[in-house]
Amino acid sequence: MSGFTKSELEAAHKAISSSIRKIEKVEITLSKKQPPPKAQLTLASRNLDALRLALSLIEREINNENLIKDRI
């Protein structure tokens, strides 16, 4: 167990998913600018990578909790 409740994990999942969608929109907007701002695009890309990693860890934790409950 992670020390977080399932509802806390689901709330974090929702918030991170929302942030990912927003940063993806920002990334598209930035890439259309001439010249494209490389530093901002790099930052957006790295933030997306980190958020996607966090999201996958949260999903794994939610799935692990479901597996544990199924076994009980």
Image (cartoon, helix red, strand yellow):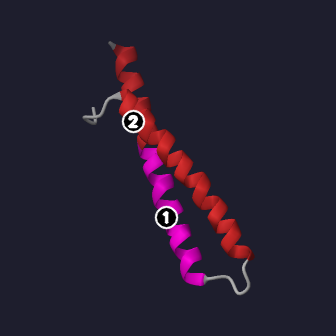
- Which sits in the foreground, 69 or 20? 20
- Name the quarter where the C terminus is drawn: top left
In the image, is residue 37 above or below residue 21? Answer: below
Seen at 44% across and 30% down, the residue is 63
Corner quadrant of residue 70 = top left
| Residue neighbourhood size for the residue with mark 1, other residues' Cα within 10 Å, grouped as few (<14), some (14–19), many (≥20) | some
In percent of width and height, residue 35 lies at 70, 87
Task: Report crowding for label 2: few under 14, some 14 to 19, many 20 or more residues within 10 A (C-alpha).
Answer: some
Q: Residue type at mark 2?
A: Leu
- For this orientation, the residue located farthest to the top is 72
Q: Residue furthest left?
A: 3
Badge 2 marks a residue whose secondary structure is: helix
Q: Main secondary structure of the magenta part?
A: helix
In the image, residue 61 above or below residue 48: above
How far apart in space, not on screen, are marks 1 and 2 (Cα)?
20 Å
x and y percentages locating residue 50 in the rendered image: 45, 60
Q: Name the residue carrying label 1.
A: 47
